[in-house]
Image: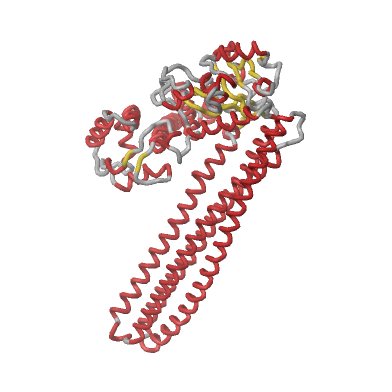
Amino acid sequence: MSLNSFLTKLGGMIKAQFQEKQIDATSQVSNPFKGTIDASIFAGADIDTFKDTIAKGMNLSSDDSIFYQNVNEAGVEDMFDYFDKNSDGIIDEEELNEVSSVDGEEGTISGYDLNYALNSMAYESIMDSFDGQVKAGKIDAQQANNEAMQNYTSNIGGSNYQNYGSQTQNGSTISSEKQYSDKEKLETIENKEIPELEKQKEEIINKANEDIEKKNSELDNLIKENEEKLGELGEKYSDKQKEIQENDKNINEYDSQISKKQSEIGKNESTLSNLEAELGAIKTDTDDDEINKSNTERKSELEKQIKELKDKNEKLQEEISKLEDKKEQENKLKTQNRSELEEIQAQIAEKNPEIAQKMSEIQEEIQNIEESKNRDVAEIDEKIQAKRTEANELQKEIGQKTGEAESMTGSKMVQDALRLAEEELAKGVYEFTGNNDNPEIDKYRNGAANGQPWCASFVSWIYGAGQNSDNAATFGYDASVAGIRNKAESAGYYAQKGSYTPQAGDLMIQQNNASHVGMVTSVDPDGTIHTIEGNSSDKVQRCTYAPGSSGYNKISGWVKMNEWLSN
């Protein structure tokens, strides 16, 4: 592979990796590939069986066929190699579990799992070739790395990827990750990172409990094998051991209930951070009576939600306290039972030291397993708490920005439009086949399944039918960007770029006032514009335009919705 070819593919791979980061692993509808396949259909498959299954799947008249088509386009042989981790020519259950668990759920292969596989394959192929050329002395590693980064920046800066690209400031590179919205970071923490940590914690506890159970079985077998030698002491030891096992079972159950309630409290606290920050940022003393009225109503709603969540958390905390008390009592019983067990073991030692020594060794192993479990669980809990703290801080920022935006927004209709745009973004609406097709998209067109570009229809719906069945009485409906621009100019609410600073809720018009439109959601102090757009890379998505970037240079002007709808 030539260096130019390598850099081109690297740029494409990085685009794919950034696009993957935009996918919510917990929501199938937001994935670019539809269908969730039962992983078991590939169990035991060799390459021929795998090919046959893919071929049959492509002929299905359902969403699943899209899944199989993507596997086919990626290359059936390459995909088989990805599934067959140990390269033995057979896809076994363990390999399927690994492939299917990328989205946090084993047993089914989702669009998210498949997308991860495609990106992983591309990355490995490119880097293998890159390493080979470096080792062969054909290219200098540092030079190649610098050129790759330069190529990556220019490749991703195009119209379809302006929201992912890097910026340069004072000669230093700013990571694209810093451009991700707080909400996207928050979703990753709450829907992926924390659940993964909680899953790890559960696995640690379950594994430790299994190991302890095995050790208890060893004790039972030891007593049975020496029943005649131990006599009544053996029965007493066995009974006491069962009491301790019952103590452990109850303690584990209390721990599980406490953990679930603590997790619920954590989520509620995160939401509270958002609501309280929004409440604190909303102003009711502006010069606009309509804004003051709308913000007063919003503050009342927020205060009600905050009270409900605080009451709920207080109740959960009371329930946790009761569970903690029960757990403490159970631990006391366990300590007492252990003490009595040691006394029985001492009596056995007088009668048969060899058996007592074996019992002592097994008990010590059980104790070590418990201590190791407690250490590992405590470490995971610290990580979860750190993630919760990070989520709370992000929620505060989101809430504050929301409150500030609502305080400066020109009308309740603009506020509702911003909220509605966020809701549509969260749904993950995208074109099924890249031909402007999806019932959700038809909804933006007032039900017309015409298959035409839909960015203008999207903002028309946001400001019209999405809020009010009689959309002609509000913003009206336009299927073209030029129509929106012309209407705004006629009404006196259109401004050329450079003559006006947009606000949240205003519309961005691109290229000769006719090519693309999106809704502004926020503006950074440095002039960076954040938007939500329909038909951007064939979906509803959040985009970012930094001053001087290729995407920003395409902007022609702004529709001043805040002024328009305030008059």
Q: Is residue 225 left or right of residue 430?
A: left
Residue 231 on image: x %, y %: 31, 86
Q: Is residue 387 left or right of residue 230?
A: right
Screen quadrant of the N terminus: top left
Residue 170: tell me if it is visible.
no
- Please, which colouring scheme is shown? secondary structure
Residue 466 on image: x %, y %: 53, 27
Q: Is residue 527 left or right of residue 144?
A: right
Does 402 sit above or below residue 7? below
Viewer-nearest residue: 3 or 381: 381
Q: Residue at x 47, y 75 (%)?
A: 334
Q: Residue furthest bottom?
A: 350
Q: How many marks?
A: 0
Residue 314 on image: x %, y %: 60, 57
Does 188 sit above or below residue 220? above
Screen quadrant of the C terminus: top right
Does 310 sit above or below residue 159? below
**Quarter occupied by residue 169:** top right
**Quarter occupied by residue 112:** top left
Residue 469: tell me if it is visible.
yes
Viewer-nearest residue: 112 or 411: 411
Residue 39 on image: x %, y %: 31, 42
Q: Residue at x 45, y 41 (%)?
A: 26
Does 261 sit above or below residue 175? below
**Quarter occupied by residue 393:** top right
Viewer-nearest residue: 345 or 407: 407
Q: Residue at x 58, y 58 (%)?
A: 315
